[in-house]
Amino acid sequence: YPEFLPGTVRPLQPSRIGQLTDALRARTAVDVLDLRDPLEARKAVERVYHRTDTHWNNRGALAASLAILEWMARVRPGLAVPSRDAFEFYEADGQGHDLPRMLGLESLVAERVLEVRPRRPRQFRVVEPAGAGPENETGRLVTAHPDASLPRVVVFRDSFMSSLVPLVAEHCSRCVFLWQKDVDPEVIVREAPDLVIHQMVGRRLQSYLPYDAVSGLTR
């Protein structure tokens, strides 16, 4: 095989997420947000991922959420998108995250945490489960906002949405966050949302299998 000979440069193959993004944009009417773009833009300015974790930190979460809110404003005109000036930025000392935790070393590994907080108090509240906070990584998390003019949204999500929940929920009259990898049409029919978001980390595509989301739909 000549391509494996020493000194041969093999062309880079598109990533799975790149292939999926290109296919969806070319063959469907689905709006696709490739959040790598805003993350790469912020990466030139500040650290957007944890040093001891594969997840984005709160600075990366802000970049991702602003991109999502900008999309929401395009398809739902009139929705106000906050600027970065609406947030305060500070640093704090913290323990290690997922990677040292897997080794039982979270108490021995520290990380400088890059934090973000809004300048004005948030108005949304978690209504389900009772007594839960927005950081609750449950199968179903429902938030409500007193401004009924804001869109109703359903989000199918994984762990990368956890740090985005407060940022997205603050711009939804009702938001249902469902921790599941597949879109459930029954939920969409029942909730009748204005917008549906299917958020997925790219590495999940390594084992993600096709599924039939509509054959069991009853109405």
Image (cartoon, rainbow, N blue to C red):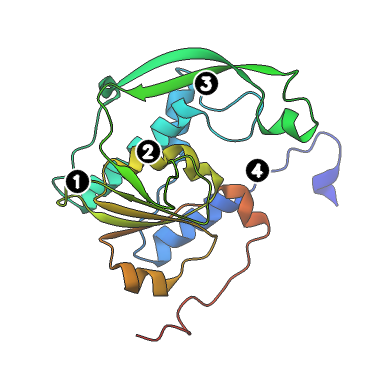
Q: Depth-wise, is mark 2 or mark 3 nearer the camera? A: 2
Please state the horizontal and vertical placement of residue 114, each as a whole percent of the image: 49, 19
Closest to the observer, 124 or 177: 124
In the picture, measured across the screen, residue 77 lies left or right of residue 122, that is: left
Specify few, some or many for label 2: CA neighbours under 10 Å numbering under 14, 14-19, or 20 or more. many
At mark 4, the secondary structure is loop
Q: CA distance from mark 1 to mark 3?
A: 34 Å
Report the residue at 58% width, 48% height from top.
Answer: 202
| Amino acid at circle 3 | Arg
| Amino acid at circle 4 | Leu
Residue labelled with disc 2: 166
Please report whichever mark, 4 or 2, sits nearer to the chain's N-terminal start. 4
Please report whichever mark, 2 or 3, sits nearer to the chain's N-terminal start. 3
Please report whichever mark, 3 or 4, sits nearer to the chain's N-terminal start. 4
Against 190, residue 104 (above or below) is above
Q: CA distance from mark 1 to mark 4?
A: 49 Å
Specify few, some or many for label 4: CA neighbours under 10 Å numbering under 14, 14-19, or 20 or more. few
Q: Depth-wise, is mark 4 or mark 2 nearer the camera? A: 2
Residue labelled with disc 1: 146
At mark 3, the secondary structure is loop
Q: How many marks?
A: 4
Q: Residue 47, labelled with which disc? A: 3
Residue labelled with disc 4: 12
Report the residue at 65% width, 21% height from top.
Answer: 95
Q: Depth-wise, is mark 1 or mark 2 nearer the camera? A: 1
At mark 1, the secondary structure is loop
